[in-house]
Amino acid sequence: MTPGPRELLKDAGLRITAPRLAVLEWLAGHPHATADQVTEGVRGKLGTVSTQAVYDVLNACSRTGLLRRIEPAGHPARYETRIGDNHHHLVCRRCGRTEDVDCVHGAAPCLEPSDAAGFVVDEAEVLFWGLCSDCRTSEKEQPA
């Protein structure tokens, strides 16, 4: 059985608080959300919560490994509860929509550095960039 938010917080050594529970529960159903989206969603659950409280929860949960923070260049950071695997992401250049990619297929020329410079590499983070179907559709509808 997958542990719930209470057990996850306890195992991570974090206090169990209403904002922490609400953030973890909301993000479980809304992966790749920005901090602003999380704040709005948590306010829908709790009624009131400060923006700073949500940022504090996101930072504490990211720091302890309960959340993964994705930072696509030129877009706000996004958060997800999917941790513990080495999945990758597709990111729309225009709107920032982010989707999971479970496995990378084909040649992988850059997943292993040519010179690790003394590092022990334990992870490669891959972001695929392009236009999502909604942005491609709206691009086609724009007059020339």
Image (cartoon, rainbow, N blue to C red):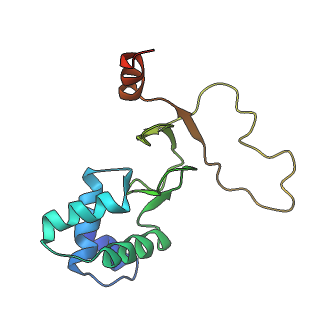
Q: Residue at x 58, y 33 (%)?
A: 104
Q: Quadrant of the C terminus?
A: top left
Q: Which image quarter: residue 56? A: bottom left
The answer, for residue 132, to whether it is visible in the render is yes
Q: Nearer the viewer, residue 4 or 130?
A: 130
Q: Nearer the viewer, residue 23 or 81?
A: 23
- What is the total number of numbered labels drawn onto the structure image? 0
Q: Residue furthest front?
A: 144
Give x and y (percent) for residue 88.
Answer: 53, 42
Q: Relative to residue 25, is residue 111 depicted above or below?
A: above
Q: Residue at x 39, y 20 (%)?
A: 142
Q: Residue at x 30, y 57 (%)?
A: 37
Does residue 61 appear left or right of residue 44 in this picture? right
Q: Nearer the viewer, residue 129 or 118?
A: 129
Does residue 115 appear left or right of residue 134 in this picture? right
Give x and y (percent) for residue 38.
Answer: 30, 61
Give x and y (percent) for residue 45.
Answer: 14, 65
Give x and y (percent) for residue 102.
Answer: 48, 37
Q: Residue at x 71, y 41 (%)?
A: 111
Q: Quadrant of the N terminus?
A: bottom left
Does residue 118 appear left or right of residue 82 in this picture? right
The answer, for residue 2, to whether it is visible in the render is no
